[in-house]
Amino acid sequence: MNVKKGVLAICFLVINLISAQEGYYFPDRNASWASAPPSAFNINEQELDEAVNFAENNEYSGSRDLRIAILKGFEREPFHEILGPTKKRGGPAGIILKKGRIIRTWGDIKRVDMTFSVTKSFLSTVAGLAVDKGLIASTNDKVGDYLWDGTFEGAHNSKINWGHLLQQNSDWTGELWGGKDWADRPPRQGGIDDWKFRKLNEPGTVMEYNDVRVNVLAYALTHVWRKPLPMVLKEELMDKIGASTTWRWHGYKNAWTEIDGIQMKSVTGGGHSGAGIFINAEDMARFGLLFLNEGRWKSEQLISPEWIREATTPSTPNVNYGYMWWLNKKSKRYWSGLSEELYYAAGFGGNFIVIDKQNDLVVVTRWLEPSKIEEFMKMVNTAISN
């Protein structure tokens, strides 16, 4: 009997190794995620373990109490306050997938934590779903043609199209949910009067990382979809990729809008003042795997390949930024020695979803010191190359 069990175990391992070398694997909801030894893909196991140990030993240096970390991280901003939920974070965690199969994990990959600006890549995807369904005809369309409540009125704001908002080069000016665009990540030179009365940049010419403008995009998309964006994301994407029921997408406490006579919460594109997407590493990996496979999950095309190509096309002002995805093109943000086709979602505190199509990899990290991500990815790449 023991011999028979041993033979069955070996057969199962052989089948797993053969399937690992073929197409992508897609985990069902609540199923045990299939794993494969690194050797099944000719990956150096010792060097991969060294990379994982590096991630575990280089935890984000900020407080695990994220209210403290947020207030300290954005203390230069006038009027900054926490307006949405926060959550004390866990320790370092992560997943490395090869062709959809887990080859390494570390930490608690089922713990739900804030993701900060990783949320932006989910928000961008909600815009992509709107384009795929024809709710938005083109990202070159003026947003004011879809939203006529005054948000995009005026000589400057009326020029802004969907692509400008997605690439963070709109220079939208105004106030939303108490947040003033000029007070969000102000330049280090000058005082409040200099920032408040600055000269506006022509839309499409200068990238400025700015959560107020990102939240304007979320507000505009809520009106296009005519329902809360968490419902859109759940119904159109997360349920279809078998994500857990534990993730949440929050907005600020005062971020309410009325659509069709119904009060709806407008969510945020990050955790700058609290809120954003709270999610576990496994669900982040599912999202990454969908993009790795050009928007297709099993037999269903959930996001068009055309949208993914558009979303990962370099913007004119910043070749390392697409539609709220960071790109690895040669510039000051370039991760040297790694594929230029690689792209990633990045959030405060070392939250990353890295898509490496060249190597069929998805890498998720939680609470890795942000300055260490390039070194970590190079270590992973070394393990794969040897």
Image (tube, rainbow, N blue to C red):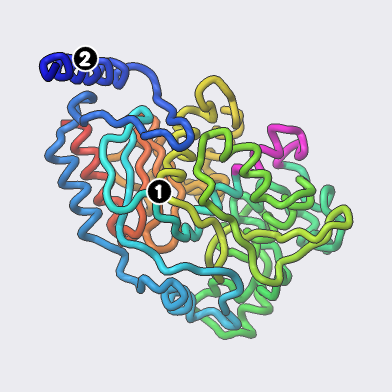
> Which residues fall within the magenta stretch?
125-139
Between residue 178 and residue 22, name the one nearer to us. 22
Do tag 2 and tag 1 residues touch (Cβ < 8 Å)?
Answer: no
Classify 7 as above or below 214. Answer: above
Q: Quadrant of residue 2 in the image?
A: top left
Residue at 87% from the left image edge and 56% from the top image edge: 148
Residue at 33% from the left image edge and 53% from the top image edge: 108
Q: Answer yes or no: is residue 18 visible.
A: yes
Quadrant where the N terminus lies? top left
Q: Quadrant of residue 174 in the image?
A: bottom right
Q: Where is residue 188 in the image (x, y as percent from the top left)?
A: 48, 77
Residue topped by disc 1: 281
Residue at 19% from the left image edge and 20% from the top image edge: 9
Q: Where is residue 382 in the image (x, y as percent from the top left)?
A: 19, 38
Question: In the shown orientation, is residue 185 left or right of residue 253?
Answer: left
Residue 11 image label: 2
SS at circle 2: helix
Tell me which numbered mark, 2 or 1, is placed earlier along the sequence: 2
Q: Position of residue 302 (x, y in %)?
A: 60, 30
Pair 2/1: label in front? 2
SS at circle 1: helix
Question: In the shown orientation, is residue 191 left or right of residue 326?
Answer: right
